[in-house]
Image: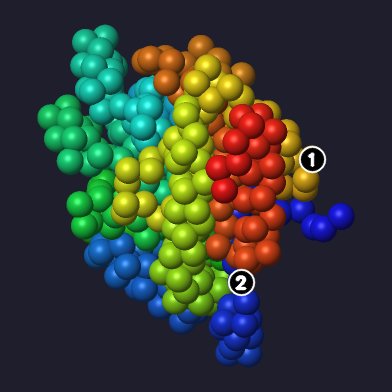
């Protein structure tokens, strides 16, 4: 049996190898160094922000971003229920409470009208809402044209969770640049990777300087290790930054490859009733992950049945995120829900989407899906 095809494996090759070896040979193996500074400049230029701070994970970037806009103990922070747990965990690290809001069925991104209702409700109850954290789901930007005025009107700062969205844009503006501060992730499964890492991006130089200080154990700029506050050890290493610089060179090629794959899925499912691609209308997505949403009544089959069929053939799929309001760790958290996130969780399936998949692997996936559909519907869509 041939090897398992994973959902979104790292896409690294000779360029990454040469950058990493050059960094190693330069002697800058200790935490900071020229690749780290260059990586920050290059990512800030790509996102279009005044600056950036490279850190050890996207979660660390979110944590520092929340601290940067003044989130603290007892505050409420609005987070979409349909996200990866890191968004809500970072809120908890500050001592604040996440409040969950449901999503738009077409994209899985935050439902902005519902967010406006929630902000009004929280204010009416005397809650201090210290931040809103929109998540650019699977690499598709939130409708910031609608969201930013709602948050401005409520006078609540935006921390953009763009962990999944580097390279995407909304009305020509890059993901990561929409809030007071944005958080990116370079985890192993993301659009580009440093094996593990993240970055804060912002126009606010003061916020970034403070984040850099807090990420370095809050060490005062004196030689004798002076500390007046509790900090964290959150900086990215120079070696990993070198890996990130090579990935950044290849980012557009990797996005194009993922888009090609999404187009092929779109073509395969197009003739079938009751199946759509999540967020397909967004042509400015970075196509990080492609998910289908199945209406079992119309389609005559369930998303989970296709998932089980593919698993049997060594092909990895995943449900769309399990909503945060259903997670035991957040039991009892306040939420404003419509049932959309639960429906996407029940009927969504994320398909292999990685830019590293070669042509024979892609053929294997498409053939396996075609086999399932032919058996279930009696028609081969291919
Ligand atoms: C991956 C991810 C993160 C966290 O990034 P790490 O680098 O894994 O810490 C945060 N938010 C979302 C939405 C993510 O997908």
| Local secondary structure at mark 2 | loop
**Residue at horizontal 56 percent and vertical 53 percent from the top:** 353
Relative to 311, say whether 38 is above or below: below
**Residue at horizontal 60 percent and vertical 36 percent from the top:** 379
**Residue 224 visible (yes or no):** no
Residue 366 in percent (x, y) is at 62, 51
Q: Name the residue under label 1.
A: 312
Query: Image check: 115 left or right of 38?
Result: left
Residue 342 in percent (x, y) is at 50, 20
Query: Image check: 372 left or right of 26?
Result: right
Residue 38 in percent (x, y) is at 41, 77
Q: Disc 2 or disc 1, which is closer to the eye? A: 1
Count residues near mark 2 (Cα–Cα under 10 Å), then give few for <14, some for 14-19, many for 20+: some
User: Observer-nearest residue: 178 or 71?
Assistant: 178
Query: Image check: 153 left or right of 21?
Result: left
Residue 263 in percent (x, y) is at 45, 53
**Residue 161 visible (yes or no):** yes
Q: Name the residue under label 2.
A: 12
**How far apart are the two marked residues, 2 and 1, measured between alpha carbons?**
27 Å
**Residue at horizontal 75 percent and vertical 40 percent from the top:** 311
- Residue extending farthest to the front is 379
């Amino acid at each position: 049996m041939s090897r398992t095809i994973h959902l979104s494996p790292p896409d690294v090759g000779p360029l990454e190898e040469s950058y990493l070896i050059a960094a190693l040979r330069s002697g800058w193996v200790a935490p900071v160094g020229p690749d780290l500074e260059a990586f920050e400049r290059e990512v800030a230029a790509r996102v279009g922000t005044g600056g950036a701070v490279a850190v050890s994970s996207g979660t660390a970037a979110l944590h520092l971003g929340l601290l940067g806009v003044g989130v603290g103990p007892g505050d409420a922070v609005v987070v979409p229920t349909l996200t990866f747990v890191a968004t809500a965990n970072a809120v908890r690290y500050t001592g604040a409470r996440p409040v969950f809001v449901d999503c738009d069925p077409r994209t899985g991104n935050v439902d902005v009208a519902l967010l406006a209702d929630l902000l009004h409700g929280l204010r009416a109850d005397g809650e201090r809402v210290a931040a809103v954290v929109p998540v650019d789901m699977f690499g598709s930007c939130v409708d910031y044209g609608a969201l930013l005025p709602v948050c401005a009107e409520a006078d609540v700062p935006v921390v953009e969770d763009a962990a999944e969205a580097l390279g995407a844009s909304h009305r020509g503006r890059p993901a990561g640049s929409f809030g007071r501060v944005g958080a990116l992730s370079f985890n192993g499964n993301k659009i580009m990777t440093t094996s593990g890492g993240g970055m804060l991006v912002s126009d606010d130089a003061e916020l970034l300087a403070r984040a850099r200080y807090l990420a370095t154990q809050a060490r005062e700029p004196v030689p004798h290790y002076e500390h007046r506050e509790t900090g964290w050890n959150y900086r990215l290493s120079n070696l990993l930054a070198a890996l990130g610089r090579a990935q950044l060179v290849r980012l557009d090629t990797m996005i194009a490859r993922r888009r090609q794959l999404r187009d092929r899925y779109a073509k395969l499912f197009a003739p079938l009733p009751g199946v759509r691609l999540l967020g397909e209308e967004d042509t400015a997505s970075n196509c990080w992950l492609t998910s289908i949403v199945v209406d079992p009544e119309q389609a005559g089959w369930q998303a989970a049945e296709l998932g089980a069929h593919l698993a049997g053939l060594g092909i990895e799929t995943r449900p769309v995120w399990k909503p945060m309001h259903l997670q035991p760790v957040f039991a009892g958290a306040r939420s404003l829900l419509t049932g959309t996130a639960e429906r996407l969780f029940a009927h969504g399936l994320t398909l292999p989407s990685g830019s590293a998949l070669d042509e024979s692997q892609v053929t294997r996936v498409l053939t396996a899906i075609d086999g399932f559909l032919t058996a279930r519907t009696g028609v081969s869509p291919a």
